């Protein structure tokens, strides 16, 4: 069916880098320290298809080709997105066999996975590296240092 046959008279076009689709990624996901950079890339990839409602989504082989990661890496880094409630994945079956997946990008994540913009917990592995201020001594007191003037350090008036 052509544009003329669709009954719509106006056309909206997008040019440039946004012409193939785009998405807006929540800052909460990008700041979630539990997610690896690869998990965040996968999430960003999913979001690049969002915004048009229910749309056809590429297979895993296309995703790993576009992101230049292995299939094992994809599943390793996709798993936390499901675990923490950012993406829900459902397998559909047809005639007893897997047909396709339905991915849902969750707008609300479970309370226990939400970072709530709280400060990070202090690190318990290392001691505090903040030291108390020491007394500032006179920096012009150089009596403990020898004069740096020696025969070898004096510049000659004419180069060799």
Image (spheres, rainbow, N blue to C red):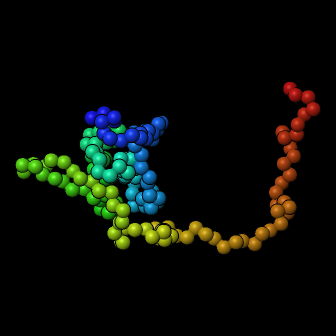
Image coordinates of residue 50 in percent, x first then y, are: 36, 50
- Residue 145 appears in which quarter of the rendering? bottom right
Looking at the picture, tell me which residue is in the foreground, 119 or 124: 119
Which residue is found at the position 40% from the left and 52% from the top? 40
Looking at the picture, tell me which residue is in the foreground, 65 or 90: 90
- Residue 83 appears in which quarter of the rendering? bottom left
Image coordinates of residue 69 in percent, x first then y, are: 34, 42
Image coordinates of residue 79 in percent, x first then y, are: 29, 56
Q: Quick check: 109 left or right of 14?
A: left
Which residue is found at the position 33% from the left and 61% from the top? 106
* The C terminus, quarter of image: top right
Q: Is residue 41 visible?
A: no
> From the viewer's perspective, is residue 158 above or below residue 49?
above
Q: Quick check: 98 left or right of 132?
A: left
Which residue is found at the position 75% from the left and 72% from the top? 135
* The N terminus, quarter of image: top left
Looking at the picture, tell me which residue is in the foreground, 46 or 147: 46
> From the viewer's perspective, is residue 62 above or below residue 87?
above
Farthest residue to the right: give it. Answer: 157
Image coordinates of residue 76 in percent, x first then y, are: 29, 52
Farthest residue to the left: give it. Answer: 95
């Amino acid at each position: 069916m052509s544009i003329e046959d669709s009954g719509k008279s106006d056309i909206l076009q997008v040019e440039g880098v946004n012409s193939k689709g785009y998405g807006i990624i929540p800052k909460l996901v990008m700041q979630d320290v539990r997610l690896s950079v690869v998990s965040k890339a996968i999430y960003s990839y999913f979001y690049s298809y969002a915004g048009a409602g229910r749309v056809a989504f590429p297979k895993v082989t296309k995703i790993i080709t576009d992101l230049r990661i292995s299939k094992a890496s994809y599943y390793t880094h996709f798993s936390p997105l499901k675990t923490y409630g950012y993406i829900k994945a459902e397998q559909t079956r047809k005639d007893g066999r897997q047909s396709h997946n339905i991915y849902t990008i969750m707008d609300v994540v479970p309370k226990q996975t939400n970072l709530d913009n709280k400060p990070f917990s202090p690190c318990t592995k290392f001691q505090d590296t903040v030291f108390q201020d020491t007394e500032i001594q006179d920096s012009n007191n150089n009596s403990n240092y020898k004069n740096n003037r020696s025969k070898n350090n004096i510049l000659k008036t004419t180069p060799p």
